[in-house]
Image: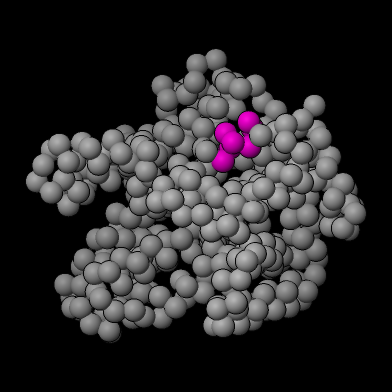
C-alpha cells in the first residue's frame, strides 16, 4: 500500500511538527467537484500575474534594450514566483492519485499534453518567419523538437504532466526519501541544457511539497484567515529576508532558494487566505479561476502591445519604464478578452479540451457543456479534480 504509506508518513511528520492544525489530514479540506477554495484561486491568480509580468519584462528588455523597475521587480520575485505556482499545483493530488490509470492519465497527462500541443502549434504558426529562417525544413525540425524541448513559457504546461506522471509512478518510494531526493536535485543546480531535465530537477520539490504537505499548507491558510495581522507580519518578514538575501547574494548558498521558496509560498498563502476571507483583492481570485486561458494566450496581446509601444515611444529608458506597467496589464486583459470572445466564435477548443481529445473509457465526463467540462465552472491551472 505505497500511497497510504506516503500520505501517512507526511501527515505524521506534520503532526509531530505541530503543523497539521486540528486534523492531520493531508488533503484537508477536500472540496467536492463543484466547489472552489477562494484562497487557492487567489494564489493561482497572484502566480499567473507574476509569471506574465516576468515574461513581459524579458521581452521589453530584449527589444527595447533597457532595464526598468519591472526588471528589478521580476528579479525580486524569482525566489517565490514558481515555487508558489507549483506548490498550489500539487495541493489536491492526494484525492486523485488513486484513480484508475486511464482516468488519471486522461486528467493529469493528456489534459496538459493537449493544450501544449495545440498552443505550441499556434505559436509556431504565428512566429513562422522568425523561426523558419526562410526554410520549411527548419520550421518542421524546430516544431518537432518543441515536443522534446518545451518551447517558451509553455514549459510549465509540459512539466505539469511530467510531474503528475512521475509522482504516480514513484508512489512506492517512502515519502521522506522521495522529498529529500527532490530537494537534493534542486540544491544541486543541475544544468544539462534540457528544459525538461533542468526544470524537473529545479521545480519538482515544490510540486511534491504541495502534495505531501498539503495539510500544513491548509493549516497555514486557516491561521492566516483567522489572524490577518500574523499573516501580514510573516509576509513582511519574508519580503525583508528575501530582499536582504538577494542583495547580498546569500540566495546562492546551498538550499537557500529551497528555503525561500517554501517560506515565501507559505507566507503568501497566509496573506492570500486573509484577503480571500474578507473579500479583498478579488481580482486575484478572478484571474486564478481563469489561470489556464491567461497562461495559454497572454503572449499574443503581450507581443502586440510591446510592438505598438515600441513604435510609439521608441527604444528609450522612458519606453521601458512605461511598458513595464502597460504590457503585463494588456497581456492579462487581452488573454481574458480572448477567453470571452473566441469560444463564442466557435473556437472554444482553444481553452476547453474537446471530447475527441479524451481517453476513451476514462471516467471524465464527455460531451458536456463548457461550464461542466472545466469542473468548477472555470479553467484554472491545474485542474484540482
- Which is nearer the eye, 207 or 314? 207
The percent position of residue 336, horizontal first and vertical second, equals 40, 53
What secondary structure is the magenta-colored segment mainly?
Answer: helix
- Which is nearer the eye, 237 or 373? 237
The residue furthest left is 134
The percent position of residue 182, horizontal first and vertical second, equals 64, 49
Whether residue 46 sits left or right of residue 142 in the image: it is right
Question: What residue is rendered at 66% in x and 57% in y?
Answer: 39
Question: What residue is rendered at 47% in x and 37% in y?
Answer: 112
Question: What residue is rendered at 88% in x and 58% in y?
Answer: 18
Question: What residue is rendered at 30% in x and 65% in y?
Answer: 59
The residue furthest top is 361
- Which is nearer the eye, 159 or 106? 159
The percent position of residue 262, horizontal first and vertical second, equals 67, 61
| Residue 345 seen anywhere in this rendered image of the structure | no
Whether residue 326 sits left or right of residue 95 in the image: it is left
**Quarter-of-image position of residue 260:** bottom right
Tally of numbered tags:
0
Q: Is residue 240 above or below residue 333?
A: below
The percent position of residue 219, horizontal first and vertical second, equals 80, 56
Whether residue 340 sits left or right of residue 213 in the image: it is left
Asked whether 256 falls inside the magenta stretch, the response is no
Q: Is residue 109 above or below residue 308?
A: above
Quadrant including the N terminus: top right
Residue range corresponding to the magenta coloring: 163-169
Q: Is residue 120 above or below residue 269?
A: above
**Quarter-of-image position of residue 9:** top right
Q: Is residue 385 above or below residue 211?
A: above
| Residue 144 seen anywhere in this rendered image of the structure | yes
Quadrant including the C terminus: top right
Amino acid at each position: 500500500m505505497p500511497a497510504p504509506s506516503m500520505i501517512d508518513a507526511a501527515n505524521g511528520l506534520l503532526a509531530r511538527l505541530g503543523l497539521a492544525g486540528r486534523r492531520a489530514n493531508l488533503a484537508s479540506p477536500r472540496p467536492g467537484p463543484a466547489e472552489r477554495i477562494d484562497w487557492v484561486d487567489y494564489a493561482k491568480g497572484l502566480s499567473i500575474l507574476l509569471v506574465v509580468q516576468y515574461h513581459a519584462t524579458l521581452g521589453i528588455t530584449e527589444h527595447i534594450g533597457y532595464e526598468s523597475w519591472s526588471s528589478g521587480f521580476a528579479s525580486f520575485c524569482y525566489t517565490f514566483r514558481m515555487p508558489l505556482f507549483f506548490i498550489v499545483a500539487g495541493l489536491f493530488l492526494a484525492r486523485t492519485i488513486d484513480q484508475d490509470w486511464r482516468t488519471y492519465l486522461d486528467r493529469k497527462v493528456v489534459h496538459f499534453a493537449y493544450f501544449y500541443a495545440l498552443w505550441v502549434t499556434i505559436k509556431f504558426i504565428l512566429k513562422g518567419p522568425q523561426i523558419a529562417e526562410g526554410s520549411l525544413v527548419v520550421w518542421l525540425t524546430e516544431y518537432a523538437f518543441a515536443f522534446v524541448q518545451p518551447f517558451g513559457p509553455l514549459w510549465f504546461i509540459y512539466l505539469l504532466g511530467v510531474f503528475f506522471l512521475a509522482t504516480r509512478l514513484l508512489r512506492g518510494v517512502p515519502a521522506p526519501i522521495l522529498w529529500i531526493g527532490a530537494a537534493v536535485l534542486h540544491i544541486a543546480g543541475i544544468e544539462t541544457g534540457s528544459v525538461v531535465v533542468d526544470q524537473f530537477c529545479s521545480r519538482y520539490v515544490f510540486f511534491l511539497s504541495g502534495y505531501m504537505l498539503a495539510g500544513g499548507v491548509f493549516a497555514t491558510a486557516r491561521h492566516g484567515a483567522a489572524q490577518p495581522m500574523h499573516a501580514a507580519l510573516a509576509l513582511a518578514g519574508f519580503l525583508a529576508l528575501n530582499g536582504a538575501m538577494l542583495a547580498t547574494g546569500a540566495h546562492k548558498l546551498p538550499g537557500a532558494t529551497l528555503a525561500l521558496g517554501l517560506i515565501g509560498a507559505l507566507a503568501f498563502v497566509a496573506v492570500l487566505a486573509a484577503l480571500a476571507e474578507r473579500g479583498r483583492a478579488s481580482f486575484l481570485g478572478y484571474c486564478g479561476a481563469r489561470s489556464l486561458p491567461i497562461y495559454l494566450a497572454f503572449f499574443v496581446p503581450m507581443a502586440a502591445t510591446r510592438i505598438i509601444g515600441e513604435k510609439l515611444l521608441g527604444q528609450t529608458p522612458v519606453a521601458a519604464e512605461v511598458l513595464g506597467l502597460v504590457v503585463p496589464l494588456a497581456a492579462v486583459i487581452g488573454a481574458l478578452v480572448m477567453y470571452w470572445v473566441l469560444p463564442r466564435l466557435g473556437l472554444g477548443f482553444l481553452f476547453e479540451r474537446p471530447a475527441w481529445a479524451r481517453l476513451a473509457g476514462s471516467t471524465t465526463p464527455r460531451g458536456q457543456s463548457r461550464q461542466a467540462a472545466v469542473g468548477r465552472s472555470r479553467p484554472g491551472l491545474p485542474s484540482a479534480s
